[in-house]
Amino acid sequence: MIAFARATDRDLMRRFRAGDRDAFTEIYRAHSPAVHRFALHMTGDSGKAIEITQDVFVWLIHHPDGFDPIRGDLGAFLTGVARKFVQRRWQQEKRWVQYDETATPSVQPATGDGDEDKEQLRSAIAALPERYREVVVLCDLEETSYEDAASQLECATGTVRSRLHRARTLLARKLLGVNRKVKEAVRYSA
């Protein structure tokens, strides 16, 4: 199945480079959901994720020769491009002073059973430093292999593994700390 997807991606990119617009549409349909999920997990903002996804595919239109099938999968390549756009956006946002300090990230509110746990996990992941958040998003949420994640992050496989271990440790501490605070608040209010 993976070999078929690679062959299909190679064929689609060959057709796209030759000017076939339908090939680009197929590339977009096949890979935009994963690019969007990555951007959403990294930014925690649906609007920013949509913009980054659009930026990735506009970039691909202008740089069709940027993808080299010998170096890896098209999906991994596009996620790597999305990573660069996320980093660029963070760098640009750091230059501006935030006017409203009470603003919260646009994450969907909890609505029922289990949603509070999901929201705590999303918040804990969003609070991780970027290098740890990237590996959690790629390996744990997107189920990317260590090797593909290393390729996308332009680092060694061992680095991905060690960052993922550290990230999981940080998440466990954060989530245990939240649960302890909730239990203490309930105990003191009773």
Image (cartoon, grey):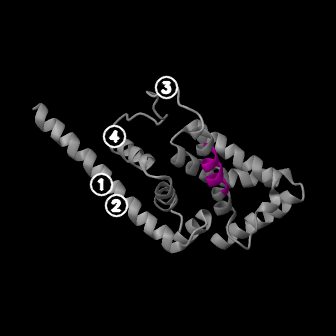
Q: Position of residue 69 (x, y in %)?
A: 74, 69
Q: In the drawing, what numbered circle is on residue 42?
A: none
Q: Nearer the viewer, mark 4 or mark 1?
A: 1
Q: CA distance from mark 4 to mark 3?
A: 26 Å
User: Which quadrant is home to the N terminus?
Assistant: bottom right
Q: Within 10 Å of the Cα at label 4, are there few (<14), some (14-19), or many (20+) other Cα atoms?
A: few
Circle 1 residue: 173
Q: CA distance from mark 2 to mark 1?
A: 6 Å
Q: CA distance from mark 2 to mark 4?
A: 21 Å
Q: Amino acid at mark 4?
A: Glu
Q: Amino acid at mark 1?
A: Arg
Q: Position of residue 140 (x, y in %)?
A: 46, 60
Q: In this rendered view, identify the residue nearer to me: 182 or 158.
A: 158
**SS under mark 2:** helix
Tell me whether the residue at label 2 lies in contact with that at label 4, contact meaning CB atoms closer than 8 angstroms: no
Q: Earlier in the sequence, mark 3 or mark 1?
A: 3
Circle 2 residue: 169
Tell me whether the residue at label 2 lies in contact with that at label 1, contact meaning CB atoms closer than 8 angstroms: yes
Q: Earlier in the sequence, mark 4 or mark 3?
A: 3
Q: Is residue 101 above or below residue 40?
A: above
Q: CA distance from mark 3 to mark 1?
A: 30 Å
- Is residue 72 in the magenta section? no
Circle 4 residue: 116
Q: Amino acid at mark 3?
A: Asp
Q: Within 10 Å of the Cα at label 1, are there few (<14), some (14-19), or many (20+) other Cα atoms?
A: few
Q: Nearer the viewer, mark 2 or mark 4?
A: 2
State which region is magenta. Answer: 81-89
Q: Position of residue 153 (x, y in %)?
A: 59, 63
